[in-house]
Image (spheres, rainbow, N blue to C red):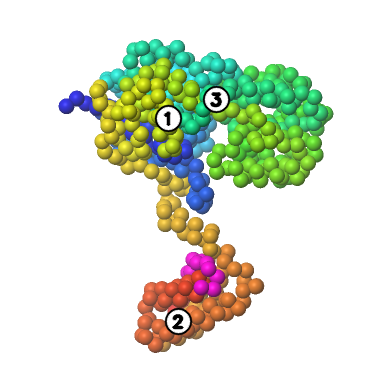
Amino acid sequence: MAEKLKIISLGGLNEVGKNITVLEYKNDILVIDCGIGFPDGEMYGVDVVIPNVAYLAKNRERICGIVLTHGHEDHIGSLPYVLTDINAPIFATDLTAGLVSLKLEEHKLLDIADINIIEPGKSFKIGCFTIEPIHVNHSIAGAVALAITTPLGIVLHTGDFKIDTTPIGCEMADLTRFGELGKKGVLCMLSDSTNAERKGFSPSERTVGHTFDSLFDRCKSRIIVTTFASNIYRIQQIIDVSARYGRKVAITGRSMENMIRVAAELGYLEIPKNILIELNQIKNFPKEQITIITTGSQGESMSALYRMAFSNHKQIEIIPGDRVIISASAVPGNEKTVSHIVNELFRKGAEVMYRGSMEDLHVSGHACQEELKVMLALVKPKYFIPVHGEQRHLIIHSELAKSVGIPHQNIVISDIGKVIEVGKKSININGVVPSGKVLVDGTGIGDVGSVVLRDRKHLAQDGMLVVVLSLSSEDGGIISGPDIITRGFVYVKEASDLIEEMRTLVTETIYACNANDITDWATLKTSIKTALSSYLYKTTRRSPMILPVIMEV
Ligand SMILES: [Zn+2]
Ligand SMILES: [Zn+2]
């Protein structure tokens, strides 16, 4: 039987984030991207979510490289955690490599990493794969699609992309090259489904520039703008419009400072001379000559904008009349934190421009339906796998593919862990490998399992209650206690009756056990728990976590 090519997504399907795709032929494994996911509201105390890479760890000898499509967290964020397990060479364009280096340095892993710079149009070979990066437009510079020539044919992974006919600071996506590959014949395409629901074309990055212009024109106050730190094109436009209206630019927030430094060093940002000032120089200029670029577009509680809004920023205080522009959309799950900041800024007398209050403050970096169809039509893949999306995005994207003529049986909607086998004349799902979420809590990787999470959820919802008592080693009678300590359950000062009832109930339970000759502690504890929890549920409709502590004296 002819050898098949295997395509396995370990993340990024039916979920937002942690994009990672494995390509496998004979003994060679190629990894595309290595991103993080974000904890949902149910994951108390979890900082990041990384993909389960047990399959890669098991086959680490066979991995010939990790190729990155661009520098967004959902594509590079897991590297510091995964590299300790599978140390394969990394291939990335210069800006992506710069961001990866910063990240690895923070984790003190830069020394062990082997980072190689790649360029659009320049093919390179790893294992049996020849890879050609192709320039695409996206909300970060240095984004590429990957045309991977395998022994069975070309596999094209679009990465995250859009088609911007009037981009800022770069050219339009290299559609010519996609067309050429289509003519040559592409075996299989994996394409970004994020905006598959949206009709038409995504607006050009340039439209946001026009909005900035109208907001800067004749503005007499300070302007404070926040956006995603990684969106260098947006930052370029903020700097340009500031220069046009004679404003100096100050930058605050660590990720924003880092990003601007790396991008400027690599020539992705053009910063006019003498326009940047330090935060402590702001006071030397009149209000109408100041722009502040800040982190915090997602309402992050450690961000500079958050600190400004809540008067915690060391150097900048919001003054009435400040014009604050939030040039971003809230990532799903962040809507509340963003509106929290917006409210606080209003309270301080700022004039806040945000999505919802005005149009065209942000454009998406992902292709909408017409762009997705253009890509499908240019590449004309034999087989098609929609990726980077939840189920509805994948299904809608597959409908788009059918509408441009890809037969139903040549499209595979997969799920994480599923093994897609591609032959020259076939595509099907055959088998699964381990996949899923690994939760990172502080510095610990994977030490928070479902039991810990369930406890955190329980504690957060209903609080806890500790019952302390000492029993006589001779007759099992109560020597002291029971004392009841609660946290997050009831306000003790107003619940003394309830506490008293609970103490009586525990005492009765112990004596009932004694009367029945029950002396082992496990049973005593269970009896206390059962008695208390049914009582508490009846009286308060709540089920706090109950921890009996018994001492023997
Ligand atoms: Zn992206
Ligand atoms: Zn992405």
Does the rendering let one see residue 24? no
Q: Secondary structure at mark 2?
A: helix
Figure quadrant of residue 390: top left
- Of marks 3 and 2, which one's residue comes earlier in the chain? 3
* 459 or 327, nearer to the observer: 327
> Residue 48's x, y, as percent?
49, 43
Q: Name the residue beneath numbered marker 2.
A: 509
- Of label 1 and label 3, which has the lower sequence position? 3
Ligand 2 under 8 Å from disc 1 Cβ: no
- Where 131 falls versus 356 (above or below)? above
**Vertical placement of residue 355 versus 116, above or below:** below
| Mark closer to the observer (3, 2) | 3
Instruction: Count the numbered circles shown.
Output: 3
Residue occupying the point 46% across, 46% down? 440
Name the amino acid type tagged 1.
His
Q: Amino acid at mark 3?
A: Ser
**Residue range corresponding to the magenta coloring:** 538-549
Q: Assess whether residue 81 is covered by the magenta stretch.
A: no
**SS at mark 1 in the image:** helix
Query: Rounded to the nearest whole Å, what is the CA distance between mark 1 and mark 2?
Result: 61 Å
- Residue 500 position (above or below residue 376): below
Q: Which residue is mark 3?
A: 202
